[in-house]
Image (cartoon, rainbow, N blue to C red):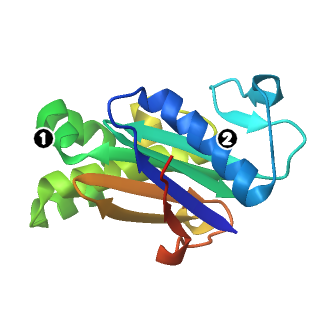
Amino acid sequence: MLKVYYGDSGEGSDHEFSWNMLRKVLKEDFNISFSDDDIIFNEHGKPFLKGNLVYFNISHYGNLCAVAISDNEVGIDTEHRDMMKNGFNEKEYRTWLSDKEQKELLKSDDPVGFLAIKWAEKRSILKMIGSGLLNVQSLKNAFRRKRRYNVTSFWIGNYCLSVTNRKGEELKMRNLVRFKG
């Protein structure tokens, strides 16, 4: 079971909106209620619910907020195209793209989109395994064990949304739900 909910936080706090979205979908779709005391964090800040067999991960960028819920480990990341256009330079790309990815970038018809997808995919992998963004090398090596999990990426407007699932369950469009708070 893998479901992803996404929504627009509007003018409010994207962080708060994401947590409220998580609370609402867990209650309505999974009959799970929790308080702040039920949330624990690993040493890198990945949140978990005490005593529940559901895994989740949250991401937000700009106004796009997303929550992934699964019966096994899951990671999600959102990025906006402008982040890659304005936030990185070529020297930085080379530090976190593998040699193969750098060659693919040179052949890409949409280098900004390519970079946004790769960045979001790598971050979703690191968020799934719970390590966070330890260093640049962790980003560069994020795909080394790709056979153990599945990464699905797609665009919602100018936002790339990437979801990684431990058991290799691919996100199907029917499992993507637009959240209306």
Q: Is residue 44 visible?
A: yes
In the image shown, does 166 or 9 lie closer to the viewer? Answer: 9
Name the side, left or right, on which 75 lies relative to 108. Answer: right
In the image shown, does 96 or 24 lie closer to the viewer? Answer: 24
Q: Which one is earlier in the sequence, the residue at label 1 or at label 2? A: 2
Name the side, left or right, on which 78 lies relative to 3. Answer: left
Q: Quadrant of residue 20?
A: top right
CA–CA distance in space, label 1 to label 2: 34 Å
Label at residue 23: 2
Label at residue 85: 1
* Amino acid under disc 2: Arg
Who's the residue at 35% across and 65% down the image? Answer: 154
Q: Secondary structure at mark 1?
A: helix
Who's the residue at 72% across and 27% down the image? Answer: 41
Q: Establish if 66 lies above or below 113.
A: above
**Quadrant that contains the N terminus:** bottom right
Q: Position of residue 134 (x, y in %)?
A: 51, 28
